[in-house]
Amino acid sequence: MKHNITRNEEAVSAAIATVLLFGGVVSIIGLMLVSMLPIIEELEGSIERDDMSAQMMILAQQTEVLSEHGMPGDSTEVELIPLDGSLSWDSTRGGMWYSSTWFDDTTFRMKSILDFDDNIEIKHPESKTTAVCYSDLRLGPTRAFFYSVPDWVENLAISSAKGLAAPLGPIKIKLMVDGSLSENIAMNIDQSINFDTSTMTDLVLESSHELTIVASSGQGGAVLVTPDNPSKNDGQGRSWTIPLSAGDSTIHVISDSSNLVTSTINGAESSEIVLESADFREGTNWTKTYTLQDSSVLTITTSAPSRLILLTDNTGTAGIVNLKSSSGGYLGTEFLTPQISGFLELTNPSETIATATWKGGGISISPKSTESVMWPPSGTTGSPIVDIDTDVIVYWHNNNTNSDSIGASIIPASDTGFSSGLEHVFDTHNSNSLDSIITQIAGYESVWNFTSTISFNHSSNYESPFHEFSTDVGNHYLSVIEGHPMRVHRVSGNSGLFELSHDGAERCLGIDTTASGWISTDLPWNTVAGRSELQILDAWQDGSHPSSYSVDLIAEAGSSEYSLVASAWIFHISRLTYEFTSSVTGMEVAYSNGAVLTNHPEFLPTVLKQPNDRSGPGPRFASTIPALNPTSDSTVGSGNMNLDIELAYRESLASQTAYEVRRGWYSPYGEAIANSAASGLEQSIDWTIYPGRLDLLTDYVGWVPDPSIGTSEAVWHTNGEPIQFSLQLSSLDVTMTEAID
């Protein structure tokens, strides 16, 4: 059978056209899908952002309640369920800071304070900037407090430092002798411990919490004890927690006004009222002696701002006390002195003669010299007030017979007026014997010179902080040639008593500059700029660079050049970040310092929740900073995560009248937070007419960006009225683990 096969050209053309048409449709669909992919990804990113934003809001609410109302040991648990992204901790980009001024018509600004190097800039144009002091806050669960003990110390009395909420305990203390672990100690928060250190060398205490330590040698002496929560502008307080050793201890409380003094020891409480004198040149005083068979913790509270002196030698032969001036430093023009028999020593480190007066007497002190007078003056029954026309240093000597004394004291820095600095001027205490000088570096490294009847140079660093040598009778000068400040103790004889601060406390640098612009100053720690995150964390842990620190500005105010006029608190706080991919990579939702933030979409910094603060009624401002720090057991990843958040401690950083409060934030969200916090400013008529003029802004109370454009810094504006300012820090330890179904 024969078939005739013919080619149908029209059919072939139709088939080819159909195939081409189908291919074109497929191509068009493909192009449409490609063009729609960013939209799909953006929709997915929006879902990611909205979902995690809601979860972060819950986290923020839980941490806010815990940080403001919880007690140490209280905890909360939050579950975070990622979609496609992952959770991680960012330890180096979560910083923020607060600052406040304690005098009217005073400003204090800072920049370059969170960039990990050893230099910051400050601005205080209203008066001469005398000095700046830094203290490491040791914020974070892995950052222990280090206490280096000089070899001359024979005994330590230790208790826990008291904040708003004490640690749940026990406090873990490691004794490191000659670089090796000697002993582990667990101490309860209400406990006092004593131990003999006479046979230990190169002793360092490593503590999980801040301690109150009274160090002594021989028969002891006398010391001015730091209050639990000292006032920032004058150093006075209303409560003290003091570790007492067995034997006799005398407490002497002095104040400018009438006082109700309450003491509690071993569960026994007693109170006494002391009335103010009619003489304005005298304050009040209260004295009591405690005889103990064993070490104990003494608690003293007062109704008026006061200072407290501890004497452990009641024979009237040993003890030297550094008195603080009414302006807060050791250098000043007004001092409230004890009504106890002894001698008053006045040192004038300036180039001009100083004249000191008190009720019934006075004395002149030549430049760069020291004078001693019998104390208290005859005819006084209260605490004598000494006024001087030039800033001087004042010591009280527990000696009933002559101006020579045995004991230990700080030699305040003459360039800063506080416990450390670059210049120290002093005389010997005792003309009958040699004085021992013990230097301790208040920084990372330093080269310094000592000049007297002998002269030499010496290098100190954080690995070898102490140097001890003897001096003869005469005037002595110690000055830093290069590097960081020094702290100097003077020990006369073989007995003494002083309060031991942790290694990162009160590191002060003299500035002595009047400037309307920015002043560059060193940060007395080692720089970690450009280092890896692991290296930075190691530096925070060993204390060679601070993870958070406070700044005190010392400047000319009133009659003194050494007044503490402003303070600031700078924090590196870990940021919890949820990272996801949208139409672009690098999107995130983050929780940082109480705020919920995101850069979605297109890297636009957005504030989803402002950091929590409270204001009113009237010119009041209060804030609690929730410092969320991961423990070493925390994990990261994209699985379902449980966050176990525990309040470690809460402390008061400030609670007093301020005149200007500022807040700054670390990038990349700083400008967004500053602008978002001032959202109500757009309703102000004054700001509309006079933008950027805080002095003309009278119809608005709240945050104002300063300067008004492009800044991460804001000022709390109250129309020029003083602010009742309260700032608290809550340290929250968080352990993040993957949830197991």
Image (spheres, grey):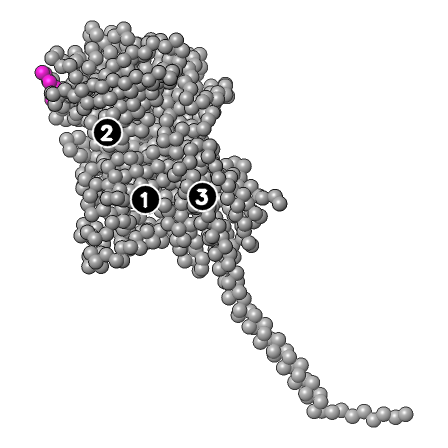
The magenta stretch is 355-361
The 10 Å Cα crowd at callout 1, few under 14, some 14 to 19, many 20 or more, is few
Q: Identify which residue is drawn at 29% across, 32% down.
A: 133
Q: Quadrant of residue 691?
A: bottom left
Q: Earlier in the sequence, mark 2 or mark 3?
A: 3
The secondary structure type at the circle numbered 1 is strand
Q: Residue at x 17, y 13 (%)?
A: 375
Depth check, front residue: 166 or 519: 166
Q: Position of residue 172 (x, y in %)?
A: 47, 25
For badge 2, the amino acid type reads Asp
Quarter of the image where the C terminus is located: top right
Of tags 2 and 3, the one toward the viewer is: 3
Give the Cα separation between the discs numbered 2 and 3: 37 Å
10 Å crowding of disc 3: few (<14), some (14-19), many (20+): some
The residue at the far right in this view is 1
Q: State the residue position of label 2.
A: 234
The image quadrant that residue 457 belongs to is top left
Q: CA distance from mark 2 to mark 1?
A: 26 Å
Q: Is residue 360 magenta?
A: yes
Q: Which residue is mark 3?
A: 62
- Mark before the other along the chain sequence, 2 or 1: 2
Q: Is residue 153 left or right of residue 259?
A: right
Reading the image, the residue beneath label 1 is 614
Report helix, strand or loop for mark 2.
Answer: loop
Front-lying residue, 429 or 562? 562
Residue kind at label 3, given as amino acid type:
Gln
Mark 1 residue type: Arg
Q: Give the CA distance from mark 3 to mark 1.
A: 17 Å
- What residue is at 34 percent from the left and 29 percent from the top? 505
In this rendering, the answer to whether 740 lies above or below 332 is below
